[in-house]
Each structure stands twice: as structure tokens, then as C-alpha cells.
Image (cartoon, rainbow, N blue to C red):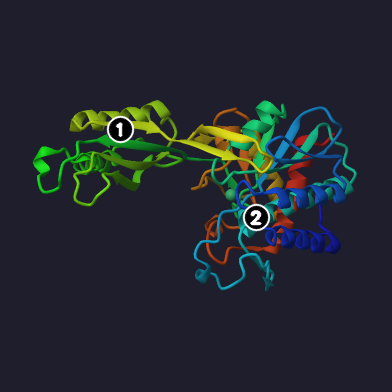
Amino acid sequence: MFQLSKHDQHACVTFLQDLVRTPSFSCQEQHVAERLAAEMRAVGFDEVWTDRIGNVIGRIGPGDGPRLLYNAHMDIIGVGDPDAWTRDPFGAEIEDGILYGRGSADMKGSLSSLVYGAKALKDEGVKLAGDLYVVGVVQEEPCEGYAMRVLVEEEGLRPDWVVLAEPTNLQISRGHRGRMELHVTVRGRSSHASMPHLGENAIYGAARIIFSLELLADMLADDPFLGKGTLAVTRIENTGGSKNVIPDSCTFILDRRLTLGETEAKALAEVEGVIAREQVRAQVRLAEFEYTSYTGYLCHDMEHYPAWVIPESHPLVQTTARAVREVVGQRPTIGKWDFSTDGVYTMGVAGIPTIGIGPGDEAQAHTADECIRLADCYTAAQIYAQLALELLGQD
Ligand SMILES: [Zn+2]
């Protein structure tokens, strides 16, 4: 079994502290990307490069054969309310074996574990029948899956298996719900607010649709593993200029979570059905996003991220469970994530067998005083080395 020496444990923590002390908000990952590439070179990866969108890719192996890709995003979300933190969000302080800071659990601890897991494999001199890729991905937080699509479809790196190192407390995750962002725009007719009967209040039209949507939410599809689809109105805005004018337009945003079997077309048709029933002049459309990566790559797509699940009986799931048992002595639980990941593309769109396992607690992601247990980072590194051996090792 692979072990991290005291020296490597120390190096793994020092590297993680550097990562946490280098803020890497989405589209501003350059400094963390450079630090990651430098660490990969220092520990002996066979090849390290940065692709057009800014992903950092490190490879170990013969250069042909099957491909195993370990994925961790480099970006973090904002700190939120600074007063909610009792630690410096970028201090990477350690107390009682726990490291604190934004991105420690989501997911810089994983990045460090992946690099040192790969180092353990390399140092052991294991002969590989295929290549291990460790990829630090950009912009997962605002548009998960997009940077992986660029890597697979534009850079031509199509793996045979993907392991997402998002936090799972070292258990296995085999899927999650998808999501869409929908915009509903209601049209009215303005008039002076002292004579509302001369106008048509767009807010009243929106209210009728929203009330119907609340009833629709109870009837959305259910899945025994992923749970129910949901919808929620998360923002509402109107135009009308002055406060004493009947508004002629009102737009609201719908956050729609998709369970298995719920497609983009189905979700749109449900809202269109509500609009038609309420006889309101309104239109629904799928929102779009646009971002420019730190390398200047323009990202543009629809806000639609499909649900995905890999069967529990799939060899990747079973091999991962075996690797975990090998390292920690017991079988992991096999469950799902509540949040969304790059799996929306790798499994949801590209159909590449994908699974999740990582150090850190899912509940720590995006919270104040975010933290990770260092012992879990070492164990994760051992698991990543063991899993790579099981999938790529020559016997
Ligand atoms: Zn994450």
C-alpha cells in the first residue's frame, strides 16, 4: 500500500497553504495555475502544460493506453460576510490538524492530495499500462463542465475514466441532479398609477404565473436515487421607471433543479404550459452566460447542466470502492452530491464514466471558516495512488 512519508506530508501541507493563500476567484486563477504547474514539475510529472482556457494538466505514464483523469477545480467563490469568519479566509492557519481558509475543502485540499498521490505512484516506480492525468480546472463555480468540454473537445484529451475530487468525506459519490436557469419576462402596458384600469400591470401577471409555478413544484418528477426535481423563484425585477407608473414589464428568474429524465425541453414546456393557462403575455427562455477566462478565452453557453448518475454496479464504482477499502480498511458508502460538479459534462454530456471521491466535508463548501482535516488529505492521496494502480497498473 502507498504511504506518504513525513517529508511528503509536510510538502503536501505547505503546498496546500500556498494554494489557500493565493486567492483564485473564477476567471482569475492564473497565480494558482502557475503554482500548481510548478509543483507538478517539482514532484516529477512526465509532462505539464496549460491549455487554451487555462486548465493545468499534468501527466504521468507511457504516453499511450487507457487514460484516467483526476479532476479538481482551481477556482473559489467569494468570502461572503467577512464578519462571519473567525479566521483569516486566506491565512491557511492550522490548529489541531485542521487547516482553515476559503477553498480548503472546495477544493484545494483535493488538488494537493492529487499531486501527492501521483507523486507516491511515480516514486514507487509502478509500471503503468496507460496515462494518469491530474487536471486543475478553471471556472467550475460559475459554469461547471465548460472547461472540461474545452479540454475534451477542443484540446482532444478524452479520458476513459474521470474521478472528481470534490469533497465527499472519502466516501463515493456517483451522481447529482442537474440545473437550469430560466428567465420569464411578462409584458404589460403602462399608465399613471392613479388610473391603473388604463394600464396592464406586469407585476400582477408575474404574480399569477409565480403562484401557478409554486403549485407545479409539487408535481415535478421524482427519482429514487437523486430525489425530486425542484423549482424556485430567486429574483424578480420590473421596469416602469417611476414608482407611480403601472409597470409594463416584469422579469423573474427561476432556479430549476433537474432530476433524472427531466430534459431542457420538458422543463421549458412546463413553464410555457403555466403561462398559457394563466393567459398572461409572457415568454420563458433559457439564460445564457458569458465569461472570459484568465487566458482570454471567451466562454459562452446556455445555463443548462444535465443530471447524471453512474450505476452502482459499474466497474469504475466497484474498483474505487475496492481501492478505498484497501487503504482505509472498510468499504465506503456510495451516495450522491447535493451540489453540481464538472460531471454534468463528463458523464452528463460526454458519457465518460465518472465518479466522485475527495477529502473534506461537502457541508464545508462555500461556508465561513471553511476547513479540512489534514489527515484526510493524506488518506485521499493514498486512495488516488491506489485507484490509479488498480485502473492503470501492469500486472
Ligand atoms: Zn467544488
SS of the residue at dot 2? loop
How far from the left and from the top, in percent, is residue 237? 32, 46
Q: Which mark is residue 300?
A: none
Q: Secondary structure at mark 1?
A: helix
Q: What residue did someone put label 2 on?
A: 359
Q: Quadrant of residue 160?
A: top right
Residue 87: x and y, percent?
Answer: 60, 72
Examine the rendering and report whether any part of residue 310 can be seen: no
Left or right for 252, reference 259: left
Q: Mark 2 or 1, which is nearer the eye?
A: 1
Q: Residues within 10 Å of mark 1 (few under 14, many from 20)?
A: many
Disc 2 residue type (three-letter): Pro
Q: Quadrant of residue 16?
A: bottom right
- Tell me the kind of residue under disc 1: Val
Residue 207: horizontal and vertical position, in percent? Answer: 22, 43
Disc ID at residue 271: 1
Q: Is residue 372 above or below residue 47?
A: below
Q: Within 8 Å of ligand 1, the CB of disc 2? A: no
